[in-house]
Image (cartoon, rainbow, N blue to C red):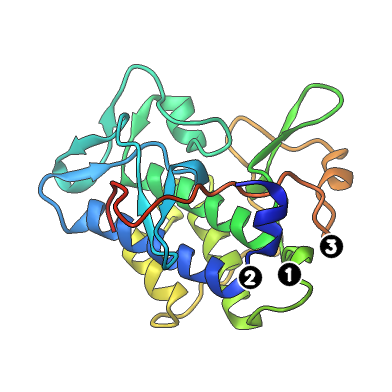
Amino acid sequence: MSGSEHAARGWRERYQIVLGIGSALVYLHQETEPRVVHRDIKPSNVMLDAAFTAKLGDFGLAKAVEDGGRRSRTTTPAGTTGYLDPECVATGRTSVESDVYSFGVVLLEIASGRRSVATLPNGSTVHLAQRVRDAADARLGGDYDAEQMERVIVVGLWCAHPDRSLRPDVRHAVNALRFDAPLPILPARSPAVAARRAPPAADALFPVTGSSGTPVTISTAGSGSNGQH
């Protein structure tokens, strides 16, 4: 999908997509046996049917996990830069919490219209989860439900917490998105991201207002596309 097409997508459709992705992950993590970790949650792996129902595609990196979906050892971190759980990168261990982290980054992208990771002029990188706070996509022109927007941003930050033990499971995250559970109280300052911190120049890259990053790309497919929902 082009940037202009994404800019035209309203909040109602975005919120529906958010809930659809969450429902797909609830199915994979809690309603299958054994549980499945997708390991590559990102916008380009989300397919939409004609009714904007979100389905997860590309299960090429997916892995069945036992022991309640807890950590399993993998030799090389699998996934896409910007969506990878920092702890998975550092330890080589993947789990359902790794998918939750990626889901959080996608939520922040959908809400803010900013890319998940950007390269600064000095060659270092800054991740969206380090910079997004109350940053609704300006291209929505203020036409969105403020309470829903707050839910998506806060749950996105909660899911993308660098300490996986402090992330919610995906069902708790979806319940919060649906207003069926209270939001967590976020710290006044963003927690440090393991093994990677944003340099001061990042403030200019991701201002609190406006939308300077590359738009979210969510591919559109026919109603017969493969995936879970």
Amino acid at dot 3: Thr
- Determine whether, in the image, residue 199 is placed left or right of residue 94: right
- Counting other residues with Cα less than 10 Å from the Cα at mark 2, is it few (<14), some (14-19), or many (20 or more)? some
Amino acid carrying label 1: it is Leu
As drawn, 116 above or below 20: above
Q: Give the image location of residue 225, x and y in percent.
A: 32, 48
Using the image, determine if residue 211 lies above or below residue 69: below
Instruction: Kindly indicate the quadrant of the structure image that contains residue 202.
Output: top right
| SS category of the residue bearing label 1 | helix
**Which numbered disc, 3 or 1, marks the residue closer to the eye?**
1
Q: Mark 3 points at which residue?
A: 209
Q: Earlier in the sequence, mark 1 or mark 2?
A: 2
Q: How far apart are marks 2 and 3 (CA)?
A: 18 Å
Q: Decide which of 161, 64 is in the foreground and name it.
A: 64
Residue located 17% across and 48% down the image:
68
Q: Name the residue under label 1.
A: 140
Mark 3 element type: loop
- First-in-chain label (2 vs 3): 2
